[in-house]
Amino acid sequence: MNWDRIQGGWTQVVGRAKERWGQLTDDDLDVVAGRREQLAGKIQERYGVAKDVAHQQIAEWQRKASDTWFSPPAAPK
């Protein structure tokens, strides 16, 4: 998945980011606003990992991204 698509649809994928990095706060994710470098910085800060590890985690998460991440949730029946 193209990072530009993730950044452009950040409000739709922020829940997926919370699932992956549960220690990131809503405020952290608001600051990130889809910017990859800021996300890496917040991951480093919250998890105490090196920059390259944060970028590896983001790349892995990005590879898992699919079009379904951008679909609105199904209405309850």
Image (cartoon, helix red, strand yellow):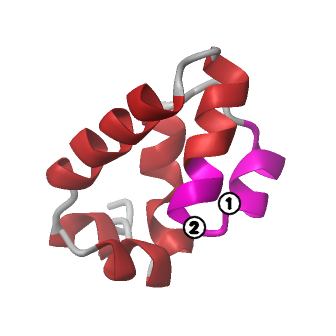
In the image, residue 49 sits, relative to residue 29, either above or below, namely above
CB of mark 1 within 8 Å of CB of mark 2? yes
Magenta segment boundaries in residue numbering = 25-39
Q: Residue tagged by mark 2?
A: 35
Which residue is depicted at the point 65% across and 55% down? Answer: 38
In the image, residue 6 sits, relative to residue 55, either above or below, namely below
Which amino acid type corresponds to the residue marked 2 in the rendered image?
Answer: Arg
Quadrant location, the N terminus: bottom left
Q: Is residue 32 magenta?
A: yes
Q: Is residue 72 magenta?
A: no
- How far across and down, in percent of the image, does residue 60 sit? 23, 40
Q: Residue 56 sits in which quadrant?
A: top left
Which residue is depicted at the point 52% across and 33% down? Answer: 51
Which amino acid type corresponds to the residue marked 1 in the rendered image?
Answer: Val
Q: Residue 35 sits in which quadrant?
A: bottom right
Q: Secondary structure at mark 1?
A: helix
- Count of labels in the image: 2
Q: Residue tagged by mark 1?
A: 32
Q: Secondary structure at mark 2?
A: loop
